[in-house]
Amino acid sequence: MSTNLRWPDPPQNLQEPLGSYLRELTRVLRDFDTAAFSQETGLMFETARRRPLVEVSSSYVMGATDCVLLVDSSASSTRITLPDALDAKGTFYDIKKVDTNGGTVVSVEGSGSEFTVVLTGTDRPSITVFSNGTTFWII
């Protein structure tokens, strides 16, 4: 990825070719790590291409910048608490139980009394939740 990207100057008037500007803009955006290009849809932004990963083996309170949480609950059951839904507005959280110990559980809880979900079993279950700023939704 280039560190000194230069945005193309927009056309100054309608006489300048808009197509060449858009091609140059597309070339610049391809260099960004947060953008991808699709032939069918044109530009498509992937805001979460690189997502912060946290690995835990005990109870954990997720922060606003955490996105992917791998939980090893092989030694004991583990409680995961999500951040406040208002602070996490627009954020997806992926939580996965990575061990195969069927005798322990991972309890995922909203910061208030929003919900509690229990991940259990030997098949490494996972959950994805999304905050709309008011509550978390299971996706």
Image: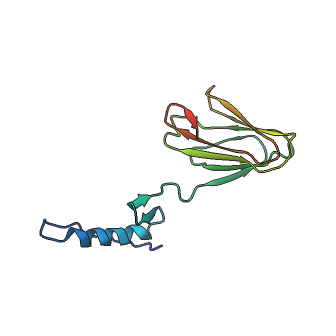
Given the current orientation, which residue lies at the most extreme top position?
A: 113
Left or right of residue 103, residue 85 in this image: left
Give the number of callouts: 0
In the rendered image, the vertical position of residue 6 relative to residue 83, given as above or below: below
Residue 16 in picture, x, y percent from top left: 16, 71
Residue 45 appears at what percent x and percent y?
43, 58
In front of the other: 115 or 54: 115
| Residue 7 appears anywhere in the view | no
Name the residue at 85% across, 47% down. 74
**Which residue is at a point 48% across and 65% down the rendered structure image?**
33
Image colouring: rainbow
Indicate the quadrant containing the C terminus: top left, top right, bottom left or bottom right.
top right
Vertical position of residue 70 compared to residue 117: above or below:
below
State left or right for residue 100 relative to residue 132. right
- Relative to 30, is 109 on the left or the right? right
Residue for point 84% across, 40% down: 104
Residue 14 found in image quarter: bottom left
Q: Can residue 107 be seen in this view?
A: yes
Which residue: 49% across, 39% down? 89
- Asked where in the image residue 137 lies, by quadrant, the reply is top right
